[in-house]
Amino acid sequence: MSEFSREFSLLLRACYPLIYIPSYEEERVEKAIAAVAQELGNRQVYIWDFVDGYQDNPNNANFARRNPLQALEFVEKVKGGGVFILRDFHRFLEDISISRKLRNLSRQLKSQPKNIVVIAPEINIPTELQEAFTVVEFALPTPEEIKAEIVRLTAAIGQSLNEQFLAELVRSAQGLSMERIRRVLTKAIAQNGEIQPEDVELILEEKKQSIRQTQILDYYHTKEQISDIGGLDNLKEWLLRRGGAFSEAARAYGLPYPRGLLLVGIQGTGKSLTAKAIAHHWHLPLLRLDVGRLFGGLVGESESRTRQMIQIAEALSPCVLWIDEIDKGFAGMDGKGDSGTAARVFGTFITWLAEKQSPVFVVATANNVENLPPEILRKGRFDEIFFVGLPTQAEREAIFTVHLNRLRPHSIHNYDIKRLAYETPEFSGAEIEQTIIEAMHIAFSQNRDFTTEDILTAASEIVPLARTARQQIESLQRWAAEGKVRLASRRTS
């Protein structure tokens, strides 16, 4: 029995009158509810929607069609136990007659084997009904459910999949609704008459589309490697040591899943590049969260989006969840002007960080530690907090080498990398890259290849952030020097 079925069964037996299930998977939810009701034995399932009314029984056919109040009155009339599923009923909850009737029913049904279940794509419960409703999460399909569905579909066309290919299909489909999984697999079957290894790309494309539609997370295809990061040797060593931490061998050894990293430091020093490189090196999908997208205008919408983000990340696990500039997302979080929404969203997120058991590796980046709520810096939220400062001269050499090796692999020996590193003090990795790009523009306009001198000319025209934001950077460096965090670089001079 699934976690949902266990919880839902308990709520029915405890006579919880009003239950709210936020899910896009209407058909799958109804099937799970019917299974629980059948197991209990004293609950018949009645289903209502606005267009067709009740449809479960010939005697009730089309009853209360286009009449949500009458749909609730029907609950009172039914003799015996029942589970009354109301599709899309969240749209009517603001109506005073509906709201009042639900509160009346909430009192009446406490002693009766009757339960009203609202299924809706998102949580939208008016303030006056929040105490009456119990919200139950309905998770995306588990790997076991996905595997069973793939086996059912392939058996229907007489195809047998080997275990390795089946495991790859299951892994690629994690995070999709069952309807989307069926749709993309039937598309593959219609195309080729069977499911082929290249169809994994079809599933991944469907996954990107699905995540994009949430407008909360972005799915990244990563190519960046650990070797693309210049310097940051302490951080890279820490990451490489944990390369096999998501394997079954690590579980058998007794290792817990790595929780995540908080990277604090100066803009342009490689924090975002590190997040991408981690996902690529560990062969894990990368999800990017913009914290600002969690906040919606409707009551309860922000909390709903936060839960949805967590559900998607856990369904896609093992994965890397990259939270860029978390300091801006939760800056100045005092609850003023938003009825405490930011505090509730942050509370949900921070609790999940501390308690999560799923293999979701969170990489959060921040530029300004003063804007971070102190709770996020507490031990237990992340495995480690690293400070990413301005690169040392040796690290600048490594950064120049990475970029020039990518752009001019056959003529890199023509560039005086030691001189370039020496002449660019206080330059960040991003500023070094911009310097090389500017040098290429200079040389391209003169129809020749760029040289060391072009790079130095470009560098002389760039004012690094270390000079324009010196006070903020010095404050960050003082905080790091207090020993509260680990240094990503081996040397700080």
Image: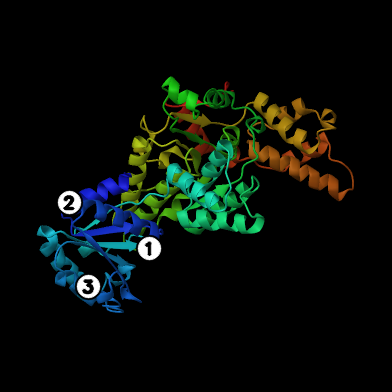
Contact between labelled residues 3 and 1, with CB atoms less than 8 Å apart: no
Mark in the foreground, 2 or 3:
2
Per the image, the residue denoted by label 1 is 297
**Which structural element holds mark 2?**
helix
Residue 330 makes an appearance in the image: no
Q: Kindly report which numbered mark, 1 or 2, lies closer to the viewer in this rendering.
A: 2
Quarter containing the N terminus? top left
Indicate the amino acid at tag 2. Answer: Arg
For mark 2, what is the residue?
13
User: Compared to 307, does 354 lie above or below?
Assistant: above
Judged from this view, the residue extending furthest toward the front is 158
Q: Quadrant of residue 406?
A: top right
The numbered dot on residue 282 is none
Whichever of labels 1 and 3 marks the residue nearer the N terminus, that label is 3
Tell me which amino acid carries mark 3.
Ile
Which residue does the image show at 18% across and 74% down from the upper left? 73
Residue 210 vertical position relative to residue 220 in the rendered view, above or below = below
- Along the line of sight, which residue is nearer the eye, 164 or 372? 164
| 199 relative to 375, above or below | below
Q: Which mark is residue 98?
A: 3
Image coordinates of residue 116 in percent, x first then y, are: 23, 63
**Residue at mark 1 to residue at mark 3: CA–CA distance:** 23 Å
Residue 437 location (% of width, % of height)? 75, 44
In the rendered image, residue 409, in percent from the top left (x then y), is placed at: 81, 33
Q: Earlier in the sequence, mark 2 or mark 3?
A: 2
Say which quarter of the image contains residue 419: top right
Which structural element holds mark 1? loop
